Amino acid sequence: MKHFLLGVGTTLAVLALAVLALLLTLGSGGGDAPAVPTPTASGSASAPTPQAPADLAPEETWLGSVDLRSADVVSPDGELADVVATGSGVRFSPEGLRAERLDIDATIPYATVASQVGTDVRIYDAGGGLAGIEREVTVLGRDVTVSATGTVEADGGQLLIEPETVDLGGPAFLDAAASALARSLVTIREDVPGVPEGMALTDVEVTDAGFAASLAGADVTIAR
């Protein structure tokens, strides 16, 4: 996720420079320069219009709002799909990007989350809004596969999966004796990796393609 967000920042910076170059090109023709509409993000008609900063440095570029979309984003942290990043009051400098507001919606494939949790972990859509978890562990000296289904929510800016059912795939006495330990092994609480200061996971849902996640933040800085 860190590389994804840095990629978003880099892409937005390139977009800002491209828009600036386009505006300069349009303004260099004969006659009066055409009026330039203020860019706005999708669905933000009711949001207050960001005001351009009065202290903008010569090497800085400012955009009122930016809407970046991509069907797929691939980074060393994993793959993301259906990515929508919306920024307002976005300020670019040689040091990086700073946004008064940044919202990111994306689908995080289950394999991406599983790889963050550890090895021998599989996460999947269990139906009914629940996530399924399978994990190879050692319990009471036995190698077993723990299977669980649980609820998913954004809690304190983190992804939280709490099991409702836990199955060790063994005798009933083993399940009873190791129930607490097994439950702890399939309770997942993870920070969203690489999220810059000021951003947090605000909503997450289980879908057939992965976790539909929303992140939001104010005064977000992404360094180059």
Image (cartoon, grey):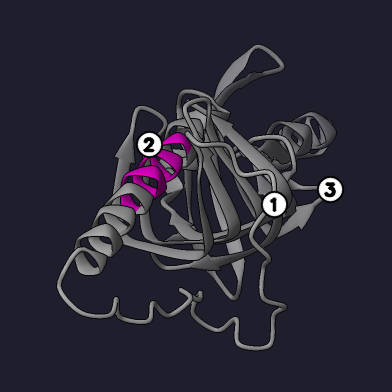
Q: Determine whether label 2 and label 3 are within 8 Å by CB.
A: no
CA distance separating discs 3 and 1: 35 Å
Helix, strand or loop at label 2? It is: strand
Mark positioned earlier in the residue sequence (3 or 1): 1
Residue 218 shows in the view: yes
- Residue carrying label 2: 78
The residue mark sitting in front, 2 or 1, is: 1
Q: Quadrant of the rendered structure where residue 64 is? A: bottom right
Q: Residue furthest bottom?
A: 46
Does residue 139 appear to the left or right of 178 in the view shown?
Answer: left
User: Foreground: 146 or 207?
Assistant: 207
Q: Which residues are magenta?
A: 6-15
- 10 Å neighbourhood of mark 2: few (<14), some, or many (≥20)? some
Mark positioned earlier in the residue sequence (2 or 3): 2
- Residue carrying label 3: 156
Q: Is residue 23 magenta?
A: no
Helix, strand or loop at label 3? It is: loop
CA distance separating discs 2 and 3: 23 Å
User: Foreground: 222 or 35?
Assistant: 35
- Residue carrying label 1: 54
Instruction: Look at 76% across and 39% down and name the residue there.
Output: 183
User: Foreground: 112 or 19?
Assistant: 19
Helix, strand or loop at label 1? It is: loop
